[in-house]
Amino acid sequence: MSPATANLFGFAGMACIIFAYAYITWRANPNPFIQHGVNLLGAALLTVSLLVNMNPASLVLEFFWASIAIWGLVKALRERSA
């Protein structure tokens, strides 16, 4: 993958994360599947970008960002099942 394509992935990931943050700010009762799902997608897209354009600190940040999103999705699934 070219660095330019990786940057497109990175910008798309950034847009996802900004959207997810804005979504929980605008909505009175945000859907956790949208919030955490979009955050997870954003972290994944940014990770693709960071694997080409390496920045170790940002890569670690995306690992934690994705982990928190997965935790949120699991929590939402458990609450929905209850």
Image (cartoon, helix red, strand yellow):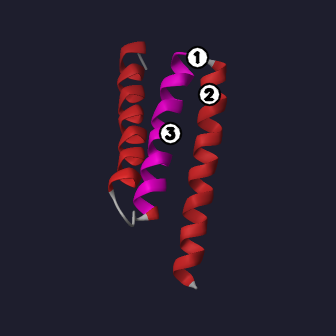
Q: Which residue is mark 2?
A: 59
Helix, strand or loop at mark 2: helix
Quadrant containing the N terminus is: top left
Q: Nearer the viewer, residue 71 or 5?
A: 71
Q: Which residues are magenta?
A: 33-53
Q: Nearer the viewer, residue 24 or 1?
A: 24
Dominant secondary structure, magenta: helix
Q: Residue at image x 41%, y 54%?
A: 24
Q: Give the x, y percent position of residue 27.
A: 34, 59
Instruction: Say which mark, if any, is on residue 54.
Output: 1
- Above or below, comparing residue 8 to residue 42 in the picture: above
Q: Residue at image x 40%, y 58%?
A: 34
What's the CA distance linking mark 2 and mark 1? Answer: 8 Å
Q: Which residue is mark 3?
A: 44
What amino acid type is highlighted by mark number 3?
Answer: Ala
Residue most extreme to the bottom? 82
Left or right of residue 25: residue 57: right
Which image quarter: residue 77?
Answer: bottom right
Q: Give the x, y percent position of residue 20.
A: 40, 47
Q: Can residue 38 be found in the magenta stretch?
A: yes
Quadrant containing the C terminus is: bottom right
